[in-house]
Amino acid sequence: MNRTLIAIPFGLICGALIGSMAGGLWLAWHLGQDLNTANPFVLLTEFPGFRAAQTDPWRFAYSIALAGSVALGLVALVISFGHKLTQYGQAHFQSRREMRRNQLLQPVGRGLVFGKLYRFGWLGRLLLSGRFISAEYDKFPHCLVVAPTRAGKGVGYVNPNVLMFPGSVVVLDVKGEIFEATSRHRVSMGDEVFRFSPFDFAHSSHRYNPLERVARVMHPAERYTELAKIADYFLTVSEKGNAGDFLSEGRQLFVAAGLLAIERGRPTLGEINRILFGQGASQGAYAAHALEVKHPNAAETFRKFSAYDGKVLSSHASVLGGAGMALWNNPAVDFATSGNDFSFSDLRRRPMAVYLVVNADSIETLAPLIRLVFGELIATLRATMPDPEREPWPVKMVLDEFDQLGRMKIVVQALKQLAGHGARVSIITQSIPGLENIYSKEERLSIESACGMKLYLAANDKMTANEISELLGKTTRLSISDSYAPDKGGLLRRSISRRNEERPLLSPDEITKLDRNQVILIPERQHPILAQRIVYYEDPSFQKIMAAQTGPLPYPSASHREIGALSEQVQALMTQVTALSKVRLIEYQSDRASDAPASVRPPHDSSCPSSAGGRDEVSNPPDHRQAIADATEDLKKTQSVNSSAEDSAPNASPVSPAKTEAARRKMARMEARIGS
């Protein structure tokens, strides 16, 4: 159809010109003029007026012009139909004009950058005279980046966008390279920078307590629900069958332990771990917890577990530990989640940069904690719609090595809604098979459909290449075949045939052989783009930013390490005192019961230290828990002073060594008292 629409006007115009020349020459001959000097376009240049044109010889001359136009128009129509080839797909890579029309060539700083265009090929790359492919932040809120190891996703996508994003950023930083490349610039932009790195023993870590938000919830049913969500975020098993059944009950036990930890005033995952496993997964321990906890659902859960035999309890403990809770046996993880140095509820109120730094060989170990942190981040953002006046800052989430974190159901569920809550998500994975190893095909397709921009770098596996080829679409290409065959006389005759063929815009084989510096972009509801990978530190736009990054990196201060060591000592003392107080209280009650006359001895239930009945507050022997609480309060005050000093002078040394030393001396006295 397109070919016919072009051929008919072309034939009519050409026929009109030829017919006008023929008619003009006939008119000159008819009027007796010399044909060598006559104007062949007299019908166009010397129009005699409508009345004269309707009389001979003008009428006949114009009839010749009209006949020529119609004749050539019909010839063009016949030719267009006679040689028309079947058309198939129309997929193609966008031209610069199309990208400009689709608003994909925005200035740097107006939106995310995905690739680069060079006008003069290798010469343009040499002269760095190119334009960034960049769309405004709201055009493609979420992006999926598929790139194998060492393909350049850091220098080509992550670092430039973390440097330029005008809001808060939360980045999963494998190896810490993103922190080193961008954190000082984020400080210069006015961000508060936090580095959450539990296994960095050289620089310590800022702390984040996922239970702090839940502890502030006052409604018992809502608190129970929020703890159940947290259990769902990070407690997962890869095995099917019995492990899944045990984990379902294990999550109930986690919720019950969380409620008890909050009631004790120690709402941390480390405390939950101590409640679950500190005294062993035994019937007696769970029975004691059932008597201690006030929440009826938690008490019922503990009573149910106290009725299981030891083998079943051991299986539950094994599954729950393997699902993620065993991570909190590590004192570094316990400390990193023991308090809050930052809150996700502040991300939209003021600009912040939070880096979750892990080594590549620690991703699998820390995966439960990472799932929990990002699950809490998403839950916090989804809890309320952003207030344009109080919460003007958007939030950028970068999930690197997404396929190594385990299944994150909340990401699949929330991805399409997060843009409305002010969040922009970049998911980075090494391959499509890596995603399908964790998520079902339907979940993987849901993630892909929620990402308005898909970016592919150096695909090197068959499944990823096949998917890219399918997403690029089909195109129509002309195929010409040349053959020779003998005629009746034995002479070779040449035969040429033409036909249109449907083929992929790029085949899987062509995709795997692309230059490693080329990037394939597939924007939502647009034709794909073949561009060059960004190397941000070679680009003049980013070289100025990199040159301005001077001074030390914003690591957590040294006081965090001291506070961490003191917190571990306090926790150990609290565990000792709790156990010692129970033993001494039981001995004390036994002595009272044996000394008292039988007629006045209290019933066993009312005298039991764990009984829900009236406890003899006056007769209980003094314990050291108040001293522990005082020491803990001193540590909190010490941390508060240090934090205030760091806020006012980020590079200054801690201003409270005396208070830290005082807290340490008080703990030494407590140890002596406990020993006596």
Image: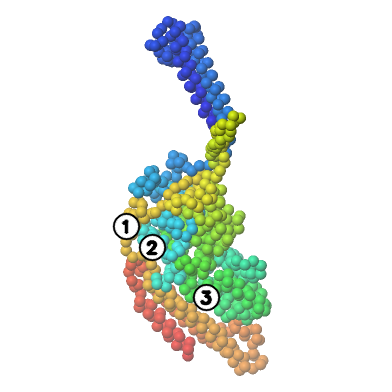
Q: Residue at x 48, y 49 (%)?
A: 520
Q: Residue at x 55, y 88 (%)?
A: 584
Secondary structure of the residue carrying tag 1 is: helix
Mark 3 and mark 1 lie on one chain; the one further toward the N terminus is: 3
Q: CA distance from mark 3 to mark 2?
A: 30 Å
Mark 1 and mark 2 lie on one chain; the one further toward the N terminus is: 2
Q: Is residue 117 above or below residue 609?
A: above
Please indicate whether residue 79 sits to the left or right of residue 202 in the image.
right
Residue bearing mark 2: 180
Q: Which mark is residue 329?
A: 3
Quarter assignment of residue 251: bottom right
Q: Which mark is residue 143?
A: none
Residue bearing mark 1: 547
Name the amino acid type tagged 1: Ala
Q: Is residue 521 above or below residue 633?
A: above
Q: CA distance from mark 3 to mark 1?
A: 43 Å
